[in-house]
Image (tube, rainbow, N blue to C red):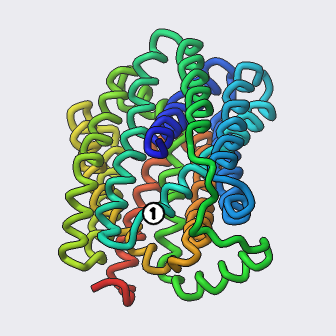
Amino acid sequence: MFSVILFLVEFVRGAALVSFLPVFGQKTLGLNFDVIGIAITAHYLTDTALKMGIGALLDRFSIRFVVHVGLLTSLAGIALLQFASSPWLFIVASALYGVGISPIWIVCLTRVSEEKRATQMGFLYTIWLVGLGAGPVVCNFVIDHSISATYYILLGLSALCWLLSLLISGAKATNVVSLPIREQFKVLGERLRHTKLLLPGMILQTGGAGMLVPILPSFAENRLGLSGAQYSLLLLAGGACTAAGLIPFGRLSDRLGGKKWFLVFGFVFIGVALYLLSTEPSIGVSMALAGLLGLSYAALLPAWNALIANYVPPQQAGLGWGIFSTVEGIGGMLGPVVGGVLAASMGEPSVVLYSAVLYGVIGFFYIWFPFRSFT
């Protein structure tokens, strides 16, 4: 049941953030890129803020209650979009939608066993990525015909997620430790001191991806010359390569026992692919680059999360994942605002170029700064 809900939640999130909100905000509401970027940042802000308190919530209330209330709040955010006639209301609706993401994601992470963690993380991220990738693909096919129909699909699926959460067990989480916010910041500081070389990757990779979110549909249409259906195929090419590669790369990472070069090559090739996309290539080349992006991300993701898992104490799994997800969320919060401002002042290709530079810098950073978990 958790996997089904996670898939549907990420399906709606991918459709909303990558396709619907930028198109709806720009074409229907007439909003600028910077406002759209702020709205997407507001989504990540509420998502990230809730992660800090997820341990306390799961310790006090049942898993079903926490997930149910979160998804109900997300449903309210989607419902509010139809009344978002002003920028501030658009931002508030996006922020409300971010509330329901954290509980289901953290609960899923705490259920991963220690044995063959990279393989299991690969499986979990396959579910997550297929949902996240399928959402924009389906959304772009529908949005070419009707923006309102796209909205009601997202609203209906959000309502379905909320109803499915009633079927979750009413038991409390057994491996989540509750700490006051002050103590969480204390633990956060201690963990960050031990993982300071992870910080560039944790923040910059989500920041680089976040920069692209407000401008992707516009960049695909105006710079790459893609229709909505062709943009869907571009996303499908990247998503299919990622989904196909996650479990094999996860197993390979477990078998080889080393993660450094999976991360280095993953980050560097993402940067290369984004740089080539910023040159506004032909449709065929764009599709090939999307596939390269997908395979690079598939190599990177299982190794990256297995590496972070080394620093998550088993007896505080919920708190540990909440803390690291919060740090990664900083990039997700800052990225859309930076991307929106850059696009408004310098154009969409500049956003893709600067995102490419970020990923390339991260990759080369980890070449020269190895640490103990790399073998």
Provide residue 303's location: percent of width, then percent of height. Answer: 33, 68
Q: Relative to the observer, which residue lies in front, 126 or 55? A: 55
Q: Which residue is mark 1?
A: 358
Provide residue 80's location: percent of width, then percent of height. Answer: 74, 26
- Residue at x 30% of width, y 70% of height: 116
In the rendered image, the vertical position of residue 189 relative to residue 215, given as above or below: below
- Residue at x 45% of width, y 39% of height: 4
Query: From the viewer's perspective, is 223 left or right of 173?
Result: left
Q: Which quarter shows the C terminus?
A: bottom left
Res. 146 visible in picture: yes
Q: Relative to the observer, which residue lies in front, 37 or 375? A: 375
Res. 43 visible in picture: no
In the rendered image, the vertical position of residue 174 relative to residue 342, given as above or below: below
SS category of the residue bearing label 1: helix
Q: Relative to the observer, which residue lies in front, 229 or 69? A: 69
- Residue at x 61% of width, y 23% of height: 155
Provide residue 50's location: percent of width, then percent of height. Answer: 70, 56
For residue 122, which quarter of the picture? bottom left
Classify 10 Å Cα crowding around label 1: few (below 14), some (14-19), many (20 and above).
many
Total numbered circles = 1
Q: Relative to the observer, which residue lies in front, 9 or 303? A: 9
Provide residue 223's location: percent of width, then percent of height. Answer: 40, 32
- Residue at x 26% of width, y 74% of height: 261
In the rendered image, the vertical position of residue 268 relative to residue 208, given as above or below: below
Query: From the viewer's perspective, is 12 left or right of 75?
Result: left
Query: From the viewer's perspective, is 248 left or right of 175?
Result: left
Label 1 sits on what residue type?
Leu
